[in-house]
């Protein structure tokens, strides 16, 4: 399969949740950058490591079962996309998964959820070690999702925009039987256009509002967020999914912001003109996806809340994590099936969550 099959990732290249720099120099940069949020204009950095794992291996990284490890934080919406795609496509046996602690120290993302604080496959304590193995002295941030080459321990890519598109296309030979087509060729132009607006105004818009350093910056970003949400609500009023009649990459990208909206973006990021649960269409749409295998079984509300409220000390200096919102609503009937549609298109639902990858009960409704 050639790279042409993957289409374009949209105009917004950027890194995922960025924990600052690691290493012996500037070791306190993570804490400083977290404390700086809200004190300077927010600008998402570009992905420095944009190599791709492809069927033909043209970047030096061929698709190969068991070779790569996907490192995510369950707190991070960008990493959440990769976790959902991996589940829907049935890549669990081909692409191993590592989950970092939602909290960070001065060296950023760490494997303190694992025995002895080390990733059992890579043998490292910090994700930054894989970055250093790839490029010594790399000056940028340590972000998730990250794809790491297991034999060498080197980071392959942190380009979260392209990663999921490649999982859907370049990794096709390793998909499970019955895997859905998340990026169908006939719909790619429409998917790309929808995703571009959602990225600019919603996915990244909530960050622009939450980390705004002036009133005018905040108000402009917040208006963009709700303008796009209102437009998206109208789009979804009479159709079950964003593009076509089944789940696509566009739905995955919108979901990872919606599922965090009331828990963190409404209060912590001051996107509080309305709650998600106050929009009947978007709330039903989000619940529909949450209750679809491959979506809700990747979401850890405990990790989400603790990361945002405890790590972003610049905008929440006390580190207090709110008790709410009540999560029980995520399991209530959504009735979106009345709109028709086929969640997995011509495919089937993914199987059970692999042993050891289950979200703890503390993170579930």
Image (cartoon, rainbow, N blue to C red):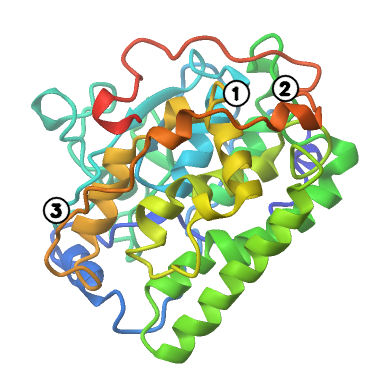
Q: Nearer the viewer, mark 2 or mark 1?
A: 2
Left or right: 362 as drawn, with respect to 162: left
| Residue at image location 33% in from the left, 33% down from the top | 153
Dot 1 falls on a residue whose secondary structure is helix
Q: Which mark is residue 105?
A: 3
Residue assigned mark 2? 344
The answer to whether one can see residue 148 in this image is no
Cα gap from disc 3 to disc 1, whole angstroms: 32 Å
Quarter of the figure with residue 356: top left
| Residue at image location 59% in from the left, 68% down from the top | 226
Dot 2 falls on a residue whose secondary structure is loop
Above/below status of 306 relative to 18: above
Q: Which mark is residue 300?
A: none
Dot 3 falls on a residue whose secondary structure is loop
Which numbered disc, 2 or 3, marks the residue that appears first in the sequence?
A: 3
Q: Are marks 2 and 1 in contact (CB under 8 Å)?
A: yes
Left or right: 272 as drawn, with respect to 174: left
Q: Nearer the viewer, mark 3 or mark 1?
A: 1
Around disc 2, counting alpha carbons within 10 Å, would you say few (fewer than 14), some (14 to 19), or many (20 or more)? many
Measuring from the top left, give residue 196's x and y in whole percent: 70, 60
Which numbered disc, 2 or 1, marks the residue that appears first in the sequence?
A: 1
Measuring from the top left, give residue 227's x and y in whole percent: 65, 70
Closest to the observer, 191 or 144: 191
Measuring from the top left, give residue 358's x and y in whole percent: 35, 19
Cα gap from disc 2 to disc 1, whole angstroms: 9 Å
């Amino acid at each position: 399969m050639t790279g042409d099959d993957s289409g374009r990732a949209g105009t917004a290249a950027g890194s995922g949740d960025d924990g600052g720099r690691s290493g012996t120099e500037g070791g306190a940069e993570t804490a400083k950058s977290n404390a700086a949020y809200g004190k300077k204009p927010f600008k998402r950095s570009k992905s420095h490591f944009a190599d791709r794992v492809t069927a033909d291996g043209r970047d030096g990284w061929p698709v190969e079962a068991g070779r790569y490890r996907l490192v995510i934080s369950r707190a991070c919406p960008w990493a959440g996309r990769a976790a959902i795609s991996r589940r829907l496509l049935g890549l669990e046996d081909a692409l191993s998964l590592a989950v970092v602690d939602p909290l960070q120290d001065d060296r950023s993302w760490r494997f303190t959820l694992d025995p002895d604080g080390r990733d059992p496959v890579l043998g490292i304590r910090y994700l930054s070690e894989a970055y250093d193995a790839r490029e010594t002295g790399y000056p940028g941030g340590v972000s998730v999702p990250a794809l790491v080459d297991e034999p060498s321990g080197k980071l392959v890519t942190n380009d979260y925009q392209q990663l999921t598109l490649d999982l859907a296309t370049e990794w096709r030979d390793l998909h499970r039987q019955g895997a859905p087509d998340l990026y169908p060729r006939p719909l790619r132009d429409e998917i790309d256009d929808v995703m571009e607006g959602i990225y600019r105004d919603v996915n990244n818009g909530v960050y622009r509002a939450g980390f705004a350093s002036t009133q005018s910056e905040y108000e402009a970003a917040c208006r963009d967020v709700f303008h796009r949400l209102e437009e998206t609500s109208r789009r979804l009023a009479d159709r079950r999914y964003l593009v076509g009649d089944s789940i696509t990459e566009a739905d995955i990208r919108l979901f990872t912001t919606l599922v965090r909206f009331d828990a963190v973006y409404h209060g912590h990021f001051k996107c509080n003109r309305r709650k998600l649960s106050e929009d009947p269409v978007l709330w039903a749409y989000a619940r529909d996806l949450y209750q679809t295998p491959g979506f809700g079984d990747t979401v850890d509300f405990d990790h989400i809340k603790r990361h945002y409220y405890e790590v972003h000390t610049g905008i929440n200096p006390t580190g207090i994590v709110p008790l709410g919102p009540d999560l029980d609503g995520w399991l209530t009937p959504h009735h979106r099936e009345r709109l028709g549609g086929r969640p997995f298109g011509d495919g089937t639902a993914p199987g059970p969550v692999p042993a050891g990858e289950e979200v703890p009960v503390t993170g579930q409704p």
